[in-house]
Image (cartoon, coloured by chain):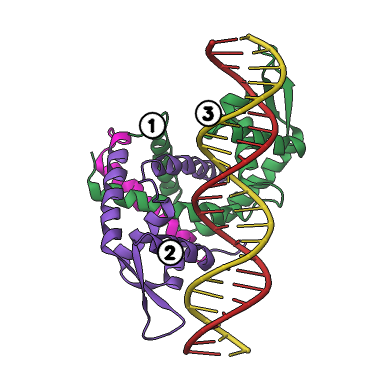
Chain colours: A green, B purple, C red, D yellow
Amino acid sequence: MAEQEQYEELARQLSSIAAVRRDLARVLPADCSPASAIVLTMLRQYGEMRMGKLAELLMIDMSVTSRHVAYAEARGWLERHPDPADRRSRLLRISPAGEALLRQVSERYTEALATRLQDWSAEDVGRLIELLGRFRNSFDGCRTRT
Amino acid sequence: MAEQEQYEELARQLSSIAAVRRDLARVLPADCSPASAIVLTMLRQYGEMRMGKLAELLMIDMSVTSRHVAYAEARGWLERHPDPADRRSRLLRISPAGEALLRQVSERYTEALATRLQDWSAEDVGRLIELLGRFRNSFDGCRTRT
DNA sequence: TATTGTTATACTCTATAACTATA
DNA sequence: TATAGTTATAGAGTATAACAATA
């Protein structure tokens, strides 16, 4: 258990991180929104999946996910194939163009982060990643009011 | 220096953190936006300041800051006093009502975080805070494209 | 009936640009 | 002229609710 003061500080830090995300988003290719990048990243990492599963991974409403997917499909970055198990649903799969886009995104993110974090050790970056992952997991399934 | 893979993972984590922020925002009092909460927090922490300084702390454009401040002032959470040094500017100061609101915000944030992070040690929370602070600082003044 | 996904609508946050008042 | 702040406008992201198709 942590102290109240720590929790307040943590809440403040979370606000600041939004600015970092905006900064990072500026390096993305012109018509690739952060939303597109994360959708494609999930499809590459976890493979073919349904809309509902994707929404769950992204922790956003399916209505929003649906629009992000439509945007990416319109640009040829992903494909929707019939789901043999359920005709209401379709399976989402990243396309070769989407893979190519992700390689570009990864390059730019990496370059931006390498520039900004040049004085960080790989160990500290690793620690930050580990703690952020744990932090996020602590919120999984917590969409009710306390 | 970290590896490319680490940077990619870090970029993914940052996307996830947005969901955490949304979750946390749900515990705020009805007409208190996350923006109001952070504006008031800054005024409490750093004291009276000008609009430009506040925008810099929040790392958002002054036009946006101006609207957040107008919103908070309309609800009596902060006051704008003449700046004796520059009549174009006004000094922003948190009001007693704003302080009261912040106490409520702090209570709810704390309760929400305590619930979600019950299996975290104070040390790990401290490490996360420290790393997030350093991370944010590494981005300060980096609003250009690489 | 319940569930999967889509669409319509509204709200929040943000940035850019044009503007006012003062330095 | 330059700067501090405001306002108008536009764009991205999200949630809720109503809806269509299928389970």
Q: CA distance from mark 2 to mark 3?
A: 35 Å
C17 sits to left or right of A54: right
Residue matched to label 3: A56
Secondary structure mostly taken by the magenta-highlighted segment of the chain:
helix
Instruction: Name the residue rendered at 34%, 69% in the picture.
Output: B79
Circle 3 SS class: helix
| Amino acid type of the residue tagged 2 in the rendering | Val
A143 and B67: which one is in front? B67
Circle 2 SS class: helix
| Amino acid type of the residue tagged 3 in the rendering | Glu
Instruction: Name the residue rendered at 31%, 39% in the picture.
Output: B112
Point out the frontmost of discs 2 and 3. Answer: 2
Q: Earlier in the sequence, mark 1 or mark 3?
A: 3
* Residue extent of the magenta highlight: B115-141
Q: Which mark is residue A144?
A: 1
Circle 1 SS class: loop
Residue matched to label 2: B69
The reply to whether label 2 and label 3 mark residues of one chain is no
Chain designation of label 2: B
Chain designation of label 3: A
Q: CA distance from mark 1 to mark 3?
A: 15 Å
Q: Residue B76 lies in what quarter of the image?
A: bottom left
Expressed as whole percent of the image width and height from the top left, the position of residue B31 reads 40, 50
